[in-house]
Every structure is written in structure tokens, then in C-alpha cells.
Image (tube, rainbow, N blue to C red):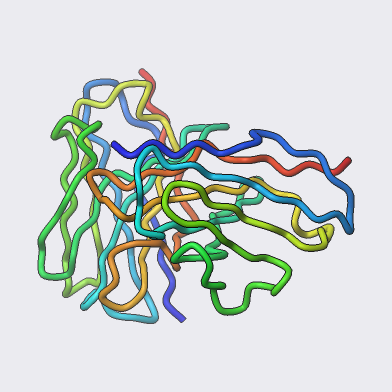
Amino acid sequence: DIQMTQSPSTLSAAVGDRVTITCRASQRINDLLAWYQQKPGKTPKLLIYEASTLESGVPSRFSGSGSGTEFTLTISSLQPDDFATYYCQQYNSFSPSTFGQGTKLEIK
Amino acid sequence: QVQLQESGPGLVKPSETLSLTCTVSGGSIGNYYWSWIRQPPGKGLEWLGFLYYTGSTKYNPSLKSRATISVDTSKNQLSLNLNSVTAADTAVYYCARGKYQVLGYFQHWGQGTLVTVSS
């Protein structure tokens, strides 16, 4: 299995802050990486795919970057609606496809 | 806009079979990959398997051949059967779909259904 490791596990930040979440893959995944946002009791929402392509309707303050085995999700200016848990997913291999353990973004 | 709706028993006894249905509305089953994903309470996401509309399937090896995903195109429904369940199978189960003919990320998700394994 390709292991996906996110850091940090928890992040405290304030409205207006710029935040970055990192996702590391245990092997190269050809930029086949997606990011999701999940709020408590809600369904995950696709934010970014192919490491850096913004899903339609997602605010431009979200961006993704990286290649090879290290990827980042950046929120340029945190809004109150952004406090949630974020997951990365590799889909280079479906043997199996795997998610990171999640990063909980909390209000400071 | 496509909508996915999971349904099934909320409580399953240990060693029995968990059976869930995902009903697709506002779109066709055809030309898409359909996945089941689960999330134990307070934990992360685990991909369980996918089915392509042609009927081909692939499963997470961690399930040790306990899972079967099938499709009923006449009803626009997918099904997940997971046999020999234990408490470790307690989770919210989601069905999800990617983009047209794309196996990869999940653009559309159902609202999820909580299944508890307990006697």
C-alpha cells in the first residue's frame, strides 16, 4: 500500500491566517493526489485534484502544489467556513487508493 | 445534478453480512466508476472498492475478500455486501463517484449511512 502521511495532525489558526498542510506519500504518485474538506457530520467535499487543479466552485484561496512524494494544501486567508478536517488521497494506485489520516484545522 | 443516497440496516450482528444500497438519481450509472468508502466514528477515510458500470470491480485487500460490490442498472443502484463483520466494521459508509470515465478522485458523495456492528 502507498502510505499517506499528513502533517500536522492538528493546526490552530486565526481568521485571515495563511495555512499550509503537508501530505507525504511513501512512494511517487505522479501528482495523482486530491484534497478534501470535511466538516463534522458532513460528507467530504472535493477541493483539489491532480495535486493543483481547483475543483469547480471552490474558492480561489485554496491552492495545491507539490510533486513526487510531497504535496501541500494552502489556504491563503482563512475564513470562518474553512475550519474543518482536511484529507489527502492518492489515486495513482487503486491497490488500494489511500487517504491521509487527516488534519484538523481549529480556531485559535 | 447527480445525487447519491445510501440505505440499509443501521445495526448488524457480528459474523453476519452488512448489505447496503446506493441509489443514484439525476444521472446514469453508465460510464462512471463507483466506489464505497467508509469512516469509523472519529477516524479517517478508507476506500473499500470500486465498480465500473461494465461490472468490473476492484477491492481493498484489507477486506480479505469479504466485500462484494454489484450494480443493478435497471434500478440505478449499487450494492455493497460485506460478510463476517466485526465491531471493526462499524463506520459511516459512503458511496462516491468521480468524473466521467475517470478512476481517481471522488467528486460526488452520498450523505453516508452509519452501520453499527453489535450483538
Q: Residue at x 54, y 55 (%)?
A: A44
Q: Residue at x 22, y 77 (%)?
A: B31
Q: Position of residue B81 (x, y in %)?
A: 21, 43
* Quarter location, residue B25: bottom left
Q: Quadrant of the N terminus of chain A?
A: top left
Q: Nearer the viewer, residue A29 or B64?
A: A29
Whether residue B17 is visible, yes or no, is: yes
Whether residue B92 is visible, yes or no, is: no
Q: Nearer the viewer, residue B78 or B54?
A: B54
Q: Position of residue B84 (x, y in %)?
A: 20, 26
Q: Residue at x 37, y 23 (%)?
A: B88
Identify whether A89 is placed above or below B82.
below
Q: Is residue A42 left or right of residue B58?
A: right
Identify whether A83 is placed above or below B117.
below
Identify whether A78 is placed above or below B26.
above
Q: Is residue A45 left or right of residue B17?
A: right
Q: How many marks?
A: 0
Q: Residue at x 84, y 45 (%)?
A: A13
